[in-house]
Image: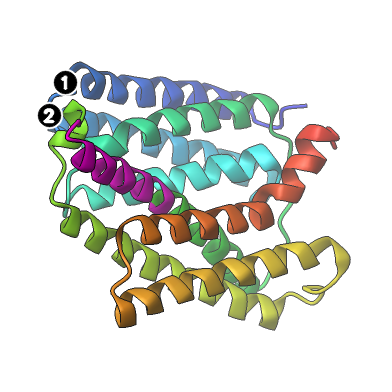
Amino acid sequence: MPHSTTAALALACFAALAYVAATAPLLANRSSGVPGRTPLLIGALAALLHAAVVVSDWFAHGGLSSSFFDAVSLTALIVVVVTLLYQYSQRLAALLAPVYISAAICVALAAGFGHYSPINAESPGMLTHVITAITGYGLLCLAALYALVLSSAERGLRKGRQGPWLSALPALDSLEQHLFSLLLATWLTIGVSIVTGMLYVDNLLQQHLLHKTVFTLVSWITLAALLLGRHFYGWRGRTAVRWTLIAFVLLALGFLGSKFVLDVVLNRV
């Protein structure tokens, strides 16, 4: 059963429509790699509506929900916000369209199929753990998308065939620099989540959390290896893309794997 209030459902519909509206000018002007103000402003409005959905449900139920669709929706919101902030330093139309469409789908699914599953975040330390865990996953989602854009640009450059968006991208060195800056922020955020989890989660190594702990640690170590490889050996290009996607898949398995099985496959309510 959907848990959203009528107000939250209405806000979710408006948010999804706003994301679609923000995507339209990007698709209509695919020859430009730099988005104009319109998709950025509409996207910011959509993000505000999306945030209002989360806040509305938070107040209605007394806390955040950890169910699969709600977790995915909150992650999508974080990705949108970080992507919009990134546009101030490097405007990339190739990032905005998939981020907006994904967010529209996520907020709609959460409103229609989400159910409330409370997160126990009563202490400040536990709340820090929850926030950094979700933020870290959102940052790694964006890094994975960035890596795919980098891979497409590199492949197009080698073959001499680039689409309108990719041909307008910044230099590969600039893309790589932004990717590794994002990966460093991701690694630090996940590191804080791991430390606060060890300090404030009593049952971190029990069976229902063990796989999350293991996958998160392995993903974090993978990111550390990639950052060290970049610093000492100059790793870049396909190596950076490959390791970024591996870290993303590992964290996705830990962060959302069990939620998907319980909430979607087994239809737990």
Indicate whether residue 38 is drawn in magenta: no
Chain part drawn in magenta: 143-161
Of the residues shown, which amino acid type is indicated by label 1? Asn
Query: Residue sitting at 61 percent across and 32 percent down?
Result: 110
Residue identifier under label 2: 32
Question: Is residue 63 visible in the rendered structure shown here?
Answer: no
Q: In screen coordinates, is 41 left or right of 113? A: left
Residue 112 image position (x, y, % from top left):
65, 24
Residue 211 image position (x, y, % from top left):
76, 63
Residue identifier under label 1: 29
Q: In screen coordinates, is 188 left or right of 230? A: right
Against 143, is 180 above or below? below
Residue sticking out furthest to the front: 159
Query: Residue sitting at 38 percent across and 38 percent down?
Result: 47
Residue 24 image position (x, y, % from top left):
27, 18
Q: Nearer the viewer, residue 219 or 52?
A: 219
Circle 1 SS class: loop
Labels 1 and 2 touching (C-beta < 8 A): yes
Q: Nearer the viewer, residue 53 or 193?
A: 193
